[in-house]
Image (spheres, helix red, strand yellow):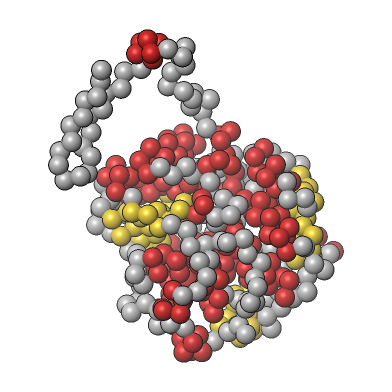
Amino acid sequence: MDYVTGLRCRECARTYPAEALHVCDFCFGPLEVDYDYERIAAAVEREQIAAGPQTIWRYAPLLPVDDPAPIDLGTGCTPLVRAERLGAELGLRDLWLKNDTVNPTGSFKDRVVSVALTKARQLGFKVAACASTGNLANSLAAHAARAGMVSVVFIPQDLERVKIVTTAVYGGHLVAVEGTYDDVNRLCAELTSERPGWAFVNVNVRTYYAEGSKTLAFEVAEQLGWHAPDHVVVPVASGSQLTKIRKGFGELYRVGLLDEEPHVRVSGAQAAGCSPVATAFATGADAVRPVRPATIAKSLAIGNPADGWYALDAVRASGGAFAAVTDDEILDAIGLLARTEGIFGETAAGVTVASLAKLAAQGVVRPEEKVVAYITGNGLKTVEALPASLGPTATIAPTLQAFDEAVDIDIDIDIDTGADADLDRRA
Ligand SMILES: *Cc1c(COP(=O)(O)O)cnc(C)c1O
Ligand SMILES: [Zn+2]
């Protein structure tokens, strides 16, 4: 049994039953899932969560669907790693990375899809559909395959080749549309009323889908010993993830899983080539003006973000900020993250790390804050965005002499063993 009491309009607070509804009939505001937090508070305990599955489903009471056998590929409980070397580069003393590159299909989208399709199946849908900038396509096709549902995925035709192949392999329908993501999304909105039996995870079951992102807050708090961080940096496409991370920390306090009320500053990261929300923040605007995307960060290339205004509001209310970074800065940041921490993120991760660097340089992210940056997608998916110059440092004949002539490795490093290790192993 779940703890959902119904759906509620974010704008006018009218309530609806927990069905496949996403907008208010009265004011067209988006709908939010409402829970009975008192009953959840009485039912949940830290120990019982700790003893739960090593997936997002350990937080089932705070998710909008209860199913003893959810549609799950093993999503969540991804590493939260201390990033001392990246932190030192950026002047941050307590930096952490939430590494969601290791989810089953390589991005945080597995969290939202697992929740959305489990709910869709419960509501009786047999077809799972979505408009996607790539990662959602991968995840939806994989989860539908596992559940034996029919999948129909719509993508902009110019997507990275890897994201196309790693969707098609799961065997569903994959439709490439001549247009931007925003064109694809508009088509899906039209199709939703034409195909009432289809669950479009980011349209008619979006209300449930979005709730899956709260697990990004739940896991971080649990991994920090049931403490919230001071500041989080989150990449923004539709803006949904950012708003739900903030909601997630608040809910943990509300149900008694955090002792202290969290005051998490939330900052947003966008690519300069698609920065409608960051621009609204920078100009102090009240509305998010749509843009036409032009960036290598295709997973974030939503020019007309559905939750843009709510993300803007969440950042302002929490005392955070937005940064927008160029494609060159994104590529540099992918390299910096890989070189300092051994994590290969996709272009969205480059956006996050470059934005973190910018916000740290501006003093928005402060040196002593406990900061968590969300690394949301795997670099193997966007290899084609990387410079062609990435390759071997030398190409040699298979002889010692050729190696000695071509490569001169000077090892002079301090290994953290307590003793000063000064190794010069040159022959
Ligand atoms: C979709 C996506 C995001 C942004 O998610 P929104 O909730 O739409 O803002 C961030 N990172 C990656 C890798 C994504 O695929
Ligand atoms: Zn309303």
| Residue under the image location 80 percent in, 67 percent down | 126
Judged left or right of residue 425, residue 322 is right
Name the residue at the right extreme.
Answer: 194
On the question of residue 319 being in view, the answer is: no
For the N terminus, the quadrant is: bottom right
**Residue 127 pos. (x, y %):** 79, 63
**Residue 47 pos. (x, y %):** 41, 79
| Residue under the image location 45 percent in, 48 percent down | 352
Give the quarter of the image for residue 210.
bottom right
| Residue under the image location 18 percent in, 32 percent down | 422
Of 377 and 235, which appears nearest the observer?
A: 377
212 relative to 297, above or below? below
Of 138 and 245, which appears nearest the observer?
A: 138
41 relative to 124, above or below? below
**Residue 37 pos. (x, y %):** 50, 85
Name the residue at the left extreme.
Answer: 419
Give the quarter of the image for residue 321.
bottom left
For the C terminus, the quadrant is: top left
- Tally of marks: 0
Judged left or right of residue 311, residue 115 is right
391 relative to 85, above or below? above
416 relative to 236, above or below? above
Of 342 and 207, which appears nearest the observer?
A: 342
On the question of residue 226 being in view, the answer is: yes
| Residue under the image location 37 percent in, 44 percent down | 341
**Residue 384 pos. (x, y %):** 58, 33
